């Protein structure tokens, strides 16, 4: 998992994309699940997909849930339940 700020730096740091792409590639090559944390917009998600990231969490994906709401959400077929 990499921190929210990595996805936010896409919006202005020249080498941020190369750094994120490298982190994703390294994690994948080591057999780790790489999850971008703190994805808040469709634009961030699309940029991360272009850089090779395939797993995300954050407000764009889903808001925080109560325990009961989580189990209902997780039971949906599209959620892997």
Image (cartoon, rainbow, N blue to C red):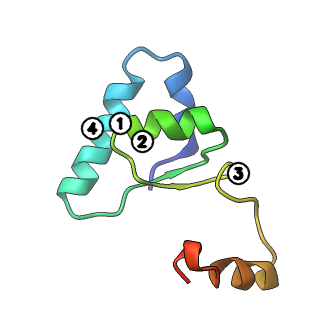
Q: Earlier in the sequence, mark 4 or mark 3?
A: 4
The percent position of residue 71, horizontal first and vertical second, equals 71, 85
Q: Quadrant of residue 33?
A: bottom left
Residue at the spot 52% in from the left edge and 47% down from the top edge: 3
**Quarter in which the N terminus is drawn:** bottom left
- Tags 4 and 1 touching, CB below 8 Å: no
Instruction: Decide which of tag 3 and tag 2 comes sooner along the chain.
Output: 2
The answer for how far apart the CA atoms under marks 4 and 1 are is: 9 Å
* Mark 3 secondary-structure assignment: loop
Dot 4 and dot 2 residues touching (CB under 8 Å): no
Query: At numbered mark 1, what does the secondary structure look like: helix, strand or loop?
Result: loop
Name the residue beneath numbered marker 3.
59
- For marks 3 and 2, give the CA distance: 17 Å
Picture disc at residue 51: 1
Q: Earlier in the sequence, mark 3 or mark 1?
A: 1
Residue at which label 2 appears: 49
């Amino acid at each position: 998992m990499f921190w929210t700020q990595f996805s936010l730096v896409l919006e202005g740091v020249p080498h941020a994309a190369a750094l994120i792409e490298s982190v994703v590639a390294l994690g994948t090559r080591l057999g780790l699940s790489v999850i971008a944390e703190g994805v808040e917009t469709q634009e961030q998600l699309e940029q991360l997909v272009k850089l090779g990231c395939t797993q995300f969490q954050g407000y764009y994906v889903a808001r925080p849930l109560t325990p009961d709401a989580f189990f209902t959400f997780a039971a949906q077929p599209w959620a892997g339940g």
